[in-house]
Amino acid sequence: MSVRTIATALAILAASTGLASAQAPKATAPAKPQQAQAPAPAAAGPTRIQQFKAWGAYSYKSGASNVCYVLSVPTTKEPASVDHGDIFFIVSQRPGQNISYEPQAMVGYVLQPNSKVTVTIDKKNFTMFTKDKAAWVENAAEEPALVAAMKTGHNMSVSAVSGRGTKTSYAYSLQGIAAALKQIETCK
């Protein structure tokens, strides 16, 4: 995987942090007066921890905590006649935000607004909601089931619809996913 590809995935992952949790309304606390703060340091580039067949384990520093994730690219992209851009499937772990194994599909184009992405693993379907160029599991309670299916499954496909209405699909190898997830288990 090229450095540009990994950097693109990191940038998208960093930009999308918090979007998945935005699906549930949260109570807001009264506003407090703001004190001047030093600007947050820029996130350091990703470090590949290890490659496990089709899946790589990576980490980067975000503020005071680490973000760890596993990432793979599709083995096939359909339709072959379109420019898909950079396509990734990521499972991230952000201990500083109490996020453990959050699956995310990232594509190189804007997804159709209010559309759903379907992840199919050995005939079991999982639905993801979309925002711009990314998708997350619609029901967060199903995230562990999706990750478990990835660990034991053989084939994974991701189906989406672009903002232009083009139906797309991606096939992923699940070889190495269990070992890659084990590698980031201790992310602190």
Image (spheres, grey):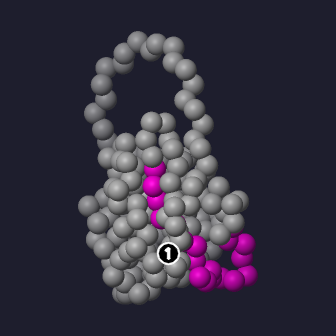
Q: Position of residue 48 (x, y in %)?
A: 56, 61
Residues in magenta, as a range: 67-85
Magenta stretch contains residue 137: no
Residue beneath label 1, please? Answer: 52
Is any part of residue 102 visible from this angle?
A: no
**Residue at position x 29%, y 66% in the image:** 144
Is any part of residue 97 visible from this angle?
A: yes
**Residue at position x 32%, y 64% in the image:** 143
Query: Does residue 132 appear to the left or right of 31 in the view shown?
Result: right
> Is residue 168 depicted above or below 138 in this figure?
below
**Residue at position x 60%, y 37% in the image:** 42
Q: Secondary structure at mark 1?
A: strand
Amino acid type shown at disc 1: Phe
Q: Position of residue 41 (x, y in %)?
A: 57, 32
Q: Quadrant of the N terminus?
A: bottom right
- Quadrant in the rendering for residue 141: bottom left
Nearest the eye: 181 or 85: 181
Query: Does residue 3 appear to the left or right of 155 in the view shown?
Result: right
Magenta stretch contains residue 82: yes
- Quadrant in the rendering for residue 124: bottom left
Q: Position of residue 45 (x, y in %)?
A: 61, 49
**Residue at position x 51%, y 61% in the image:** 49
Nearest the eye: 35 or 67: 67
Q: How many marks?
A: 1
Judged from this view, the residue extending furthest toward the front is 50
> Is residue 6 depicted above or below 34 in this figure?
below
The local crowd at label 1, few if under 14, some if 14 to 19, many if 20 or more residues have their Cα within 10 Å, is some
Nearest the eye: 38 or 108: 38
> Is residue 132 depicted above or below 159 in this figure?
above
Q: Position of residue 46 (x, y in %)?
A: 58, 53
